[in-house]
Image (spheres, rainbow, N blue to C red):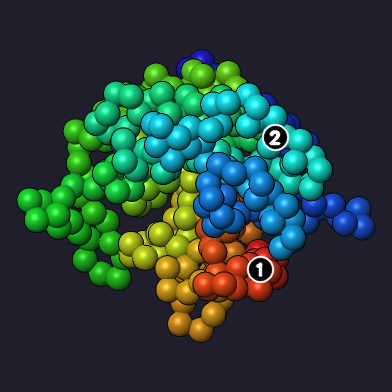
Amino acid sequence: MDMNRRQFFGTAGMAVSCFGRIVEGGQRNLLLGICDWNLGPSCDPGMISKAREVGLGGIQVSVGTGPDHMPLREPAVRQSYRELGRKYGISFCSVAAGSVLNKIPLKSEPQSAIYVVDALEAAAALGAKNVLVAFFGKGDLRLQDAEGQLRNLRSGPYASYELDSAAVTRVVEVLKQLVPRAEDLGIALGLENSLTADQNLEIIDRVGSAAVQVYYDVGNSTHYGYDVPSEILKIGRERICEIHLKDWSSPVLGMTGGEVDFAAASEACRQIGYDKWYVLETSGREERFLEDTRANVDFVTNAF
């Protein structure tokens, strides 16, 4: 908890500079990866070659999918990832604890903190500098009434939903216990959730550690009714650890009819000097993964 912001980011940034950059003609290119659940089965190192086939440089790896399926705890599985990553020139930008935390959430289940520790240890073993800490499904931090409805506190074009204050307090308390380990490893705990930028920043301030950051998702935030470019500018480069790219309305990014204003999002990223990983959370259309993912890679490379 004593590590200051400059020290944490200096440690994390130094490690990132050694991993995952595709270098062509002496130039540093975009850091672009994909979620392993979009490549195929989660936690499967056999999918690594597929990422290289579509022109990607990194993979976000799931630590597991449930209490009885946590493959990244196993040294042999980690070793397989490292060997195949070297073979195919693929880095591991982050480790995700979404599948398990969305069912066994930090806001209520004591055992959930163990899965975050698992993810931190796996990230350290794979050279990843971010852990995705998810709050969807059962882990949603927005307050729901007896009928499961949300309360929008804001009028106008953009939304802001009332929070479950007891759940948020519980999460803050758990994160305070987790950050010393994250700080020691130089790994960011990236909060991916259904909250606004202001609500996430309040959580970060309450925890009081630069190791707690925002894992920003342009597709989710657009779909929930938030002002994505303004949020990116407000959170800033130092507090966004990684960005998911997807569009709920389209399997191919930039297609007519999509929700996300990618041009505005990319301009906001340029304004804050964002130079970290973008991670596709897209699978493309059925039976067209290779074609659609290559199209998404081309789109993101041009847009960002």
In the rendered structure, which amino acid carries the disc numbered 1?
Answer: Leu
Q: Residue at x 45, y 63 (%)?
A: 219
Disc 2 target residue:
80
Q: Rate crowding at label 2 as few (under 14), some (14 to 19) or many (20 or more) other CA atoms within 10 Å.
A: some
Describe the element under mark 2 as helix, strand or loop. Answer: helix
Pick the front one: 33 or 88: 88
Which is more N-terminal, label 1 or label 2?
2
Pick the front one: 54 or 177: 54
**Residue 252, above or below 272:** below
In the rendered structure, which amino acid carries the disc numbered 2?
Answer: Ser
Q: Residue at x 56, y 31 (%)?
A: 72
Q: Quadrant of the C terminus?
A: bottom right
The x and y percentages for residue 86 are: 79, 40
The x and y percentages for residue 38 are: 54, 57
**Residue 246, above or below 203:** below
Pick the front one: 291 or 128: 291
Left or right: where 187 falls relative to 156: right
Please indicate, yes or no, whether residue 261 appears anywhere in the rendered image.
Answer: no
Number of labelled discs? 2
Disc 1 target residue:
290
Instruction: State which quadrant residue 191 falls in.
Output: top left
| CA distance for labels 2 and 1 | 24 Å
Pick the front one: 52 or 256: 52
Q: Residue at x 70, y 34 (%)?
A: 80
Residue 241 is labelled as: none
Please indicate, yes or no, whether residue 254 appears anywhere in the rendered image.
Answer: yes
**Residue 266, above or below 100:** below
Left or right: where 227 falls relative to 278: left
Describe the element under mark 1 as helix, strand or loop. Answer: helix
